[in-house]
Image (cartoon, rainbow, N blue to C red):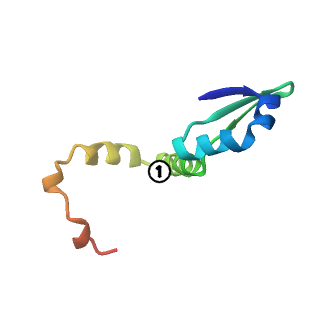
């Protein structure tokens, strides 16, 4: 995580945002009123999806169990009917 002040962030906003987008590096911006964290859109969407999945009863356990399944036992992607 990049830690910076609001003054430094203002001076370098474009380069800092590019780094956050390219490398998914969060930015912690400190101000007199408190701090704010800036995430890439990709990280934000991933975080929201994780929170959503964790809100479904037993989903976490099912995901953990599924991650133990050998790849050879999985259905090929082109065989899945969506």
Q: Nearer the viewer, residue 30 or 62?
A: 30
Say which quarter of the image contains residue 78: bottom left
Q: Where in the figure is residue 49, as x and y percent of width and height?
A: 51, 51
Whether residue 37 is visible: yes
On screen, residue 11 above or below 75: above
Quadrant of the rendering where the N terminus is positioned:
top right
Q: Where in the figure is residue 21, as x and y percent of width and height?
A: 58, 47
Q: Where in the figure is residue 58, as x and y percent of width and height?
A: 39, 47
Q: Secondary structure at mark 1?
A: helix
Residue at 83 percent of width and 30 percent of height:
7
Q: With 2 as the anchor, is 61 left or right in this view?
A: left
Q: Nearer the viewer, residue 59 or 3?
A: 3
Query: Farthest residue toward the left?
Result: 72
Near mark 1 (Cα within 10 A), the count class, few <14, some 14-19 or many ≥20, is some
On screen, residue 40 above or below 73: above
Q: Where in the figure is residue 40, as x and y percent of width and height?
A: 60, 46
Query: Farthest residue toward the bottom?
Result: 81
Residue indicated by mark 1:
53
Quadrant of the rendering where the C terminus is positioned:
bottom left
Q: Nearer the viewer, residue 10 or 50?
A: 10
Residue at 54 percent of width and 46 percent of height:
22
């Amino acid at each position: 995580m990049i830690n910076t002040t609001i003054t430094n962030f203002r001076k370098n906003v474009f380069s800092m945002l590019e780094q956050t987008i390219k490398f998914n590096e969060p930015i912690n911006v400190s101000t007199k009123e408190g701090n704010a964290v800036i995430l890439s859109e990709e990280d934000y969407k991933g975080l929201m999806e994780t929170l959503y999945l964790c809100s479904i009863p037993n989903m976490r356990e099912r995901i953990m169990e599924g991650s133990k399944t050998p790849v050879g036992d999985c259905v090929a992607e082109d065989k899945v009917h969506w």
